Amino acid sequence: MSDIHFMKRAIEEALNNVLTNHGGPFGAIVVKDGKIIGVGRNEVTSTNDPTAHAEVQAIRAACSYLKDFQLTDCEIYTSCEPCPMCIGAIYWARPKAVYYACTKQEAAKIGFDDQFIYEQLELPMENRKIPMMKLFPDDGDIPFRTWENSKNKVEY
C-alpha cells in the first residue's frame, strides 16, 4: 500500500468524524510494516477531553496494539499538520515519520488556530496568559530522587 493510500484513509477518518458529529475534522492513522495498527479521530467535544486529538488517539491505539510506549519503525498519517500538543506526543512516541495533508494555516482559516499556543510557548512563564509558577515544598524533589536511585526504572 502506498503513502497516498494511507493518507486517504486518515482523511476518510476525518470526514467520517464530521459527518457523524463526533468531533472536529481531523483523522490520523499509525502504520507499521504496511499495516494500520492505530486509528484516531478528533473526539474533543464528544468525550469532553481536550487531549482527544486524532494524533493522540491514534498513538494511544497503536501503542496499545504494540504493547509498547514507543512507535519504533512506525509512520503517522494525519489529515492536518499536528498542533503543538500533538507534536509533543509524536516526539515522545518516536515514530520514524509523520505525513500530513492540510497545513496549520489551512486549519486556522476554518477556526482551528494554534498560533496563540506557539506564541505563548515563546514567552517567559511569568508573561503567559495562564501563569505557571514553581511551588516547591520541602522534599518536593523526592519523586525525582527516588526515580534516580530506582533499580526498576524503565528509561524513556
Image: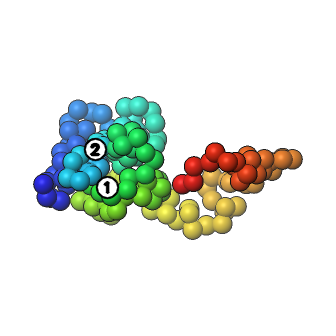
Residue ranking furthest to the right: 138
| CB-based contact (under 8 Å), mark 1 and mark 2 | yes
Find disc 2 in the rendering and name its residue: 37
What secondary structure is marked by label 2?
Answer: strand
Q: Earlier in the sequence, mark 1 or mark 2?
A: 2
What residue appears at the point 67 percent right and 53 percent down from the top-left corner?
Answer: 131
Quadrant where the C terminus sits is bottom right
Judging by the rendered image, the residue that carries numbered circle 1 is: 74
Seen at 33% across and 58% down, the residue is 73
How packed mark 1 is, by other alpha carbons closer than 10 Å (few <14, some 14-19, many 20 or more), is many
Choose between 77 and 48: the one closer to the eye: 77
The answer to whether 51 is drawn above or below residue 1 in the figure is above
Give the amino acid at mark 1.
Answer: Cys
- Seen from the viewer's position, the closer of residues 35 and 129 is 35
Asked if residue 17 can be seen in this view, the reply is yes
Query: Residue 27: x, y in percent?
Result: 28, 46
